[in-house]
């Protein structure tokens, strides 16, 4: 079922060009038959598609700065509460900012990532987070991309990510196996 749904959605996106047509087709697909909620509903869906495009165009990815410290501390709190990110002291966050990037929308932080370089052989993408309403728009991918580009600039051989979102990182080109079938293994030495 999942495979056929993905295939059908691909066909819809390729086949139709207007937002109204896409919205009608998605609704029909979801309810399993032709269904028309009327023009008002379809136009509302169309406006949602347009808003997403406008939001993406206004997102700026830039290196994090010390002036971002307070805003970044507030930004990560919900992710810490949900146990998506580990808690950071102000000192740890100050250190992380030096290697980090923020995604901004209308002067507010909506995303963050950092590249910590351990040696010329290994770096790690850390603290990747994107505000919920902006997820699925490619912002996380852009934050990963700037970290990888920074690793290339520093001539780092490999970049790893420790994550609970393995599928996302796979779409960014990460995999479980390193060249030569090496694998990274971990042991936790204290409670968080």
Image (cartoon, helix red, strand yellow):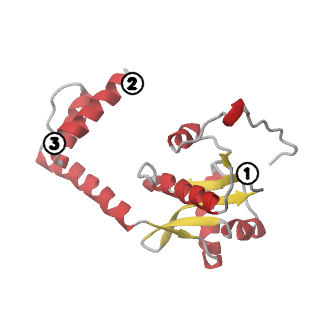
Q: CA distance from mark 1 to mark 3?
A: 47 Å
User: Which residue is depicted at the point 73% across and 58% down?
Assistant: 117
Q: Are marks 2 and 1 in contact (CB under 8 Å)?
A: no
Give SS at disc 3: helix
Secondary structure of residue under mark 2: helix
Quarter of the picture containing the N terminus is top left
Task: Give the crowd class for mark 1: few <14, some 14-19, many >=20 residues within 10 Å.
Answer: some
Q: Is residue 30 visible?
A: no
Residue wearing tag 2: 2
- Taking the image as drawn, is residue 46 in sight? yes
Task: Say whether residue 26 is left or right of residue 78.
Answer: left
On the image, the x and y values in percent for residue 145 come to 53, 55
Where 100 sits versus 19, above or below? below
Residue 122 marker: 1
The quadrant holding residue 176 is top right
- Taking depth in this image into account, of 112 and 31 the one nearest to the observer is 112
How far is disc 3 from disc 2 in space, using C-alphas?
Answer: 22 Å
Q: Position of residue 175 (x, y in %)?
A: 60, 37
Badge 3, how many Cα within 10 Å: few under 14, some, many 20+? some
Q: Is residue 53 left or right of residue 139?
A: left
**Where does the image place residue 102, in percent across and percent down from the top left?**
55, 66
Q: CA distance from mark 2 to mark 1?
A: 37 Å
Per the image, the residue denoted by label 3 is 21
The 10 Å Cα crowd at callout 2, few under 14, some 14 to 19, many 20 or more, is few
* Residue under the image location 46 percent in, 74 percent down: 107
Q: Which label's residue is closer to the chain start, 2 or 1?
A: 2
Please identify the quarter of the rendering in which residue 60 is found.
bottom left
């Amino acid at each position: 079922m999942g495979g056929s749904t993905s295939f059908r959605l691909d066909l819809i996106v390729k086949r139709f060009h207007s937002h109204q047509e896409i919205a009608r087709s998605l609704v029909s697909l979801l309810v399993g038959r032709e269904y028309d909620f009327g023009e008002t509903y379809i136009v509302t869906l169309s406006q949602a598609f347009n808003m997403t495009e406008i939001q993406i165009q206004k997102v700026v990815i830039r290196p994090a700065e010390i002036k971002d410290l307070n805003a970044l501390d507030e930004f990560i709190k919900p992710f810490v509460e949900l146990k998506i990110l580990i808690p950071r002291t102000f000192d740890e966050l100050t250190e992380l900012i030096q290697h980090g990037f923020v995604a901004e929308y209308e002067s507010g932080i909506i995303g963050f990532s950092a590249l910590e370089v351990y040696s010329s052989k290994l770096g790690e993408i850390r603290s990747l987070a994107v505000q919920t309403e902006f997820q699925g728009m490619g912002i996380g991918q852009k934050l990963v991309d700037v970290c990888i580009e920074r690793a290339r600039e520093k001539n780092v051989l490999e970049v790893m990510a420790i994550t609970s979102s393995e599928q996302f990182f796979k779409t960014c080109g990460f995999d479980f196996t390193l060249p030569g079938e090496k694998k990274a293994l971990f042991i936790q030495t204290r409670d968080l």
